Image (cartoon, rainbow, N blue to C red):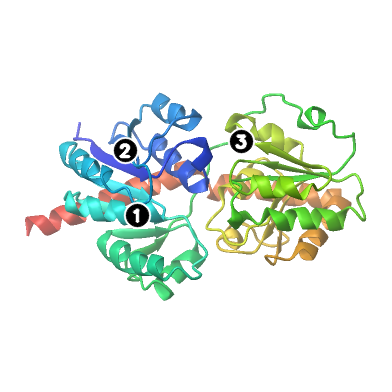
């Protein structure tokens, strides 16, 4: 058998308080690489504990956690340099801005043959230093700079001046959803039978603009006085939402991935009210469960949802538009069913993590072979 290719997937952390779509996707990629062809290592730049780390290790992926304590703690990067050299890592695949910058810098210093950077989106507004580092350190130091949406690739090239030949759009995906465990969320929350329920599952970060969802719910209560809003996830925005004291808004905190199907089954409409997105895994999870989706038309969301076909799209920062779209679905059960079914079909066909990983495996081999040919000249 040919020698396995050693791939180190690099992220900031696996701990629940830091988990977003980018961290979850990076872990999924590491777990789904073919263990017969690839030696799989997941590097976290900060200490990592919790269910996701346990799942990664249970799948046979080695976890190497650095002890970085903050943004300006650079001492662990020396340890990473030594690890990459000692393990003869062939491919370093970094995810998100911090790991992209440091992974590219340390990876090149350690003479890793192939360095892949993966952007999982940001607003591309302000932050001159970030744009500069993306365009120079990452865009020129990495062998390829992956974008999770066509819109992100455009902005990487036009706003950050990443070389066009290095910027590549790669559709992402999720695992087939687990079966329901049997939890009855409506009963747990004492929601009356027949009351409309809308909600979301996400990291509670400013990007998600959950205030827009809460404001839309307030408008909807004029027509649906018994409306309930369910928000699952952890993060800094939870306290601000709770402080608003809006009626019938349920903050559930961190929700186990195994129980997400039970949560989504309780929703009449799933919502994404983000200010910006890359290619949101949450929306794909909603679609996989056949939930009708209302989402803001930002970033890569229109790559996933055709408006009126797989869900409804609305402008960002517009509670009235969001409320109108949710209200339309609450009023029209047949439309909910049609959009939910179309969304489920599209997710299964186009946004499956197994398809993504096979594409990545081919990319790793392609880039390694190209490097080896150059070195043999």
In the picture of the structure, the residue carrying the numbered disc 1 is 100
Taking the spot 76% from the left edge, 31% from the top edge, the residue there is 185
The disc at residue 31 is none
Q: Secondary structure at mark 2?
A: loop
Which of the pair 18/326 is nearer the observer? Answer: 18
Residue 344 visible somewhere in the drawing: no
Task: Give the left or right position of residue 340, taking residue 150 as reference.
Answer: right
When the figure is inspected, residue 259 is found, relative to residue 101, above or below; the finding is above
Q: Which residue is mark 2?
A: 66
Mark 2: few/some/many CA within 10 Å (<14, 14-19, 20+): some
- Displayed quadrant of residue 179: top right
Can you say which quadrant of the picture contains the C terminus? bottom left
Residue at 27% in and 66% down: 140
Residue bearing the label numbered 3? 254
Query: Percent x, y for residue 125?
Result: 51, 70
Of callouts 3 and 1, the N-terminal one: 1
């Amino acid at each position: 058998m040919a020698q396995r290719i050693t791939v180190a997937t690099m992220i900031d952390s696996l701990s629940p308080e830091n988990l977003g779509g980018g961290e979850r996707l990076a872990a999924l990629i590491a777990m789904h690489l073919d263990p017969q062809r690839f030696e799989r290592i997941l590097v976290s730049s900060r200490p990592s504990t919790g269910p996701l780390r346990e799942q990664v290790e249970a799948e046979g992926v080695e976890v190497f956690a650095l002890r970085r304590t903050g943004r300006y703690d650079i001492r662990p990067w020396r340890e990473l340099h030594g690890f990459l050299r000692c393990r003869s890592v062939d491919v370093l695949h970094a995810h998100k801005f911090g790991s992209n910058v440091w992974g590219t810098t340390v990876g090149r210093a350690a003479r890793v043959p192939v360095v892949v950077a993966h952007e999982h989106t940001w607003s591309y507004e302000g932050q001159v230093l970030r744009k500069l580092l993306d365009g120079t350190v990452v865009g020129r130091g990495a062998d390829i700079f992956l974008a999770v949406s066509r819109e992100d690739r455009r902005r990487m090239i036009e706003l950050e001046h990443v070389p066009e030949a290095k910027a590549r759009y790669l559709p992402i995906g999720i695992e087939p959803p687990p079966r329901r465990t049997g939890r009855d969320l409506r009963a747990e929350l004492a929601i009356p039978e027949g009351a409309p329920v809308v909600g979301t599952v996400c990291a509670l970060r400013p990007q998600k603009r959950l205030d827009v969802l809460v404001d839309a719910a307030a408008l909807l209560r004029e027509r649906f006085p018994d409306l309930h809003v369910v928000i699952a996830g952890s993060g800094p925005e939870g306290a601000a939402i709770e402080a608003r004291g809006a009626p019938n808004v349920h903050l559930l905190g961190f929700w186990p991935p195994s129980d997400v199907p039970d949560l989504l089954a309780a929703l009449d409409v799933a919502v994404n009210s983000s200010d910006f997105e890359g290619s949101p895994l949450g929306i794909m999870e909603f679609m996989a469960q056949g939930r009708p989706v209302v989402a803001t038309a930002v970033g890569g969301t229109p790559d996933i949802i055709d408006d009126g076909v797989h869900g409804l799209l609305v402008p960002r920062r517009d509670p009235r538009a969001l409320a109108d779209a949710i209200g339309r679905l609450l009023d029209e059960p047949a439309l909910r069913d049609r959009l939910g079914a179309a969304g489920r079909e599209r997710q299964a066909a186009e946004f499956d993590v197994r398809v993504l990983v096979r594409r990545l495996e081919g990319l790793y081999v392609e880039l390694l072979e190209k490097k080896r040919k150059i070195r043999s000249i």
